Amino acid sequence: MNKINTGKKVPDFSLPATGDQPLSLKDFKGKNVVVYFYPKDSTPGCTLEGQDFRDQISKFRRRNTAILGISRDSIKSHENFKARQGFPFELLSDADEKVCKLFDVIKEKNMYGRKVMGVERSTFLIDDKGVLRREWRKVKVKGHVDEVLEAIKEL
């Protein structure tokens, strides 16, 4: 699979998701989709980011926009995380990193002085025609969701 580029159609992908279902990008045809990649369920930054999307979900829905969170965690981990935080959107499991690689979010990171490969916190805005409109890489959680909402208003 080729990497994605801004201004180009995003290839369809399908992953197992919470709610015991596979989800594909094509399932959201006619809607804008925010795909956010995060490193790990139930960690401080990832929890805060998910809570920010949760707390502003009505603003996204008013703008015909779905939210999808993706990490390498298992569906069981996702189900627990989603239930604990009351997320009103689905979390997708990319254990084999297929979609992570498509979006080029697997990066070398420093963890306790060791180099490891992990998910770089990143967000992608796909319009209602399946075209990538914006990408945010190396995301800092504070204020990020507001930035994404602003970008949706510009579509």
Image: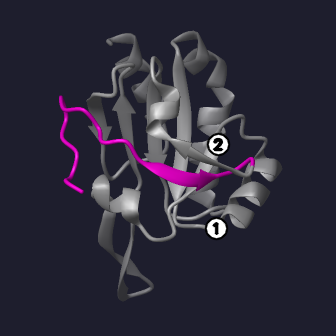
Give the Cα distance between marks 2 and 1: 13 Å
Residue at the disc numbered 1: 74
Q: Is residue 60 visible?
A: yes
If the image is split into quadrants, where does the C terminus sit? top left
Residue at disc 2, secondary structure: strand
Residue at disc 1, secondary structure: loop
Specify the amino acid type for callout 1. Ser
Magenta-highlighted residues: 1-19
Residue at the disc numbered 2: 90
Which residue of the protein is positioned furthest toward the bottom in this rendering?
114
Secondary structure that dominates the magenta span = loop
User: Residue 136's image quarter?
Assistant: top left
At a point 77% along the width and 47% down the height, the residue shown is: 85
Specify the amino acid type for callout 2. Glu
Residue 149 drawn at (x, y percent): 45, 21
Q: Is residue 50 left or right of residue 13?
A: right
Residue 28 drawn at (x, y percent): 50, 28
Relative to 86, residue 80 above or below: below
Q: Earlier in the sequence, mark 2 or mark 1?
A: 1
Q: Is residue 146 visible?
A: no
Residue 127 drawn at (x, y percent): 36, 22
If the image is split into quadrants, where does the N terminus sit? bottom left
Observer-nearest of 144 and 70: 70
